Image: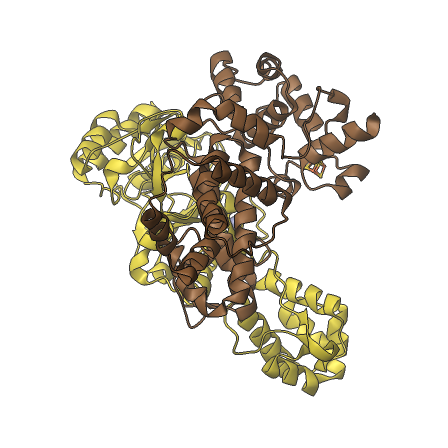
Amino acid sequence: MNRGFILRKFREYYSKNEVKAPPQIEQREFGIGLEKKIDSRHMQFQNADKLNFYLRSAVPLYISYSAAFYEFPEARPMPNKNRTGADLIFDLDADECDVSCTHPHDEVCSDCMRQVKLETERLVNGFLKPDFGFKNDDLTIVFSGNRGFHIHVRSDIVHDFDQNARKEIVEYIGAEKIKLVHPGENRQLYGPTIQSAGWGGKIALTLYETIRSSENTKEFKKKTGLLTPAINNIFRNKTAALEAMRTGIWSKVPVSANAWDDLVKDLAGKLRVNLDKNVTMDMARLLRLPGSLHGGTGLVACEITDLHKFDAFSDPIVFGDTPCKVTPKQNKTFLLNKKEYSLEKEKSIELPEYAAIYAICKNWVNIHD
Amino acid sequence: MDREELEYAISYPFTSKAKKVVEQTGFNLDDPPLEVLDRAKQRIEENIRGSFEPVKSSSEKILLTELFSYPVAKILASLTTDYSLIQRFSRGEAARLSRHLLNDPHRLSEIAKELGINISENQISFADYVKAAPEKYPLVNAPLKQGVIQIDDRILPEIIANTLRSKLSQELSKKINVPQVYSKQASAFKKELLSFTTEDLGPLKIEAFPPCINTLINQAKLGSPMPHQPRFVLSSFLVNTGMPTENIVRLFANTPNFNENKTRYYVEYSAGKRGSGIKYTPPSCKKMDFYSLCRNKDALCNSIHHPLSYYSRKKRDKK
Ligand code: SF4
Ligand SMILES: [Zn+2]
């Protein structure tokens, strides 16, 4: 019953809405899920019409497409597809963010979503644009339909990146292998300055600002969450420390190279963005198709124009509010469309259609005929 | 023949200028003279051992032989379809290049351009950088701003040389059309060239497997799922130890969704008997660690960098 209802609603959606074809659709591999997220892949659609026709007739619960371009998207095994390039993908998921929520691990609340959104904004405005020089036009931000965002970088320059190049990029964002202080002449230690580009500048500037605005180690700790041995020495020589960040001669402060390294690493750990690096590195990965429905929520995976304003619990709602009668299988409260819904086990209740679909997809309720 | 041009071509044999010089001499790649063939083999051997001296000779014949040895050596290296030989050959050519660049700092951007990277006033796009920079200069430590990196003079030659390395190793790993003269003797060449690569792993010795591999073998036997990465590690490792295909296939028999034919194809693929014809080697310990496949490290692990070196070392020690 549930399944029939969902399929009927999904078909209705696909009949009324045209799903936009991703760029170079004919070179992409598609995968669909009738039960699970992906239960068959290696599919190809020549154009938007064929894709939409398929969605209307087969009504998959999930559909995803490849970040990669292939000469033969349908060929198998994978090497026979002959990959010719791939978009660069970043995946930010509620899983990756460290929010201390009390709900079960596989659920999302507005706190988790707020956190993921912040991380996504940090990735775009703190890394992709200023450091990598990507423009708004290069970046497509997509809500996955459930608990996170994908950023698709579709600039030509990234298409021929191999796995290793992609790894360098995620490692940059994750500040892995960061090492900024080096011994130089006259037993001096050199590091970045507040004007340096890249991570050097981020670290030096953050140190500079935080040292300047903190009275003592305690305040520094409060602002950064860090208390490494180097910090005591820094505050004993505050003027010299600020001078060090301005000039790049870090040995102005009596802190050893190792202690600096530790401080840099810890601080970078606070400034980095947490993302799922496998998604970026795995060029065979399939991603939720923007414009398609997510079978686990009934929400639409959508391209986002204004991330800051985006509300993951309202904006991706596509179904109406005709009342639908459902019987909850468990107690549950959830937030959707800025309203809170409470379900009580076995106690039938009327929900607006979009909330009913959400709850059915989550397997919390049964629909009445 | 213009002496300066010839010397340039010898130092930078991959450039378009050098190719033109070769063309002008009328050299026929399909029919290399014996001394060129010999020099080419020697060149490969030098690259593998990492020791080479620049030719200093006034004899045009010797200089020309040196020049021709590059394209011929490339064909021979590629012919072996041996992953590790190709890697070492490419590394050797890169080392030659960085040596020449040190003497020719004014040529840096010109040579970079030949290799497809644009450098002007020591600035390079991050897209070129991630393709070109050697592992020891990770992007994370580079001054990246608006997609551009300002590069230190000192590391520029290394970056350029590393680009040649990765280009060569890619180019030579592809199946190429080899002139008949070479393909006829392919197996003889292969045998001779492979003898340059240090050690033959000899008869199979299971007791010498590294802990990471033993862990994977146990998992396979217990029927745990084997995603792509561990499956590749296991089969490429075992293929290199000389374990027969059938034994390897049987090892996977308990894993979920086991399909004998697919597995056999896969193992043969790793062994270079299918597909591109390249015999794969398992990832280095560093990569293994990255994939969380470095497990149960023991004392010997600290002195090696590759699961296969663990194997050969332990084998030797056990004797
Ligand atoms: S260090 Fe290398 S050989 Fe040892 S367990 Fe890890 S990956 Fe295997
Ligand atoms: Zn939460």
**How many badges with numbers are in the image?**
0
Residue at the spot x=25%, y=45% of the render?
A: A23
Q: Kindly tell me whether residue A73 is visible in this rendering.
A: yes
Q: Quadrant of residue B251?
A: top right
Which image quadrant: the N terminus of chain B?
bottom left
Q: Quadrant of residue B309?
A: top right
- Rendered hue of chain A is yellow
Tell me if residue A111 can be seen.
Answer: no
Residue B63 percent coordinates (x, y): 48, 51
B301 on left or right of A40: right
Rendered hue of chain B is: brown
Q: Position of residue B87 (x, y in %)?
A: 54, 41
- Which residue extends farthest front? B59
Picture colour scheme: by chain
Left or right: A262 in relation to A28: right
Q: Residue at x 49, y 68 (%)?
A: B105
Image coordinates of residue B317 in percent, x first then y, are: 82, 30
User: Looking at the image, is B299 positioned above or below residue B114?
Assistant: above
Quadrant, the C terminus of chain B: top right
Up-down relation of residue A212 to residue A124 (above or below): below
Name which residue lies at 74% across and 77% down: A187
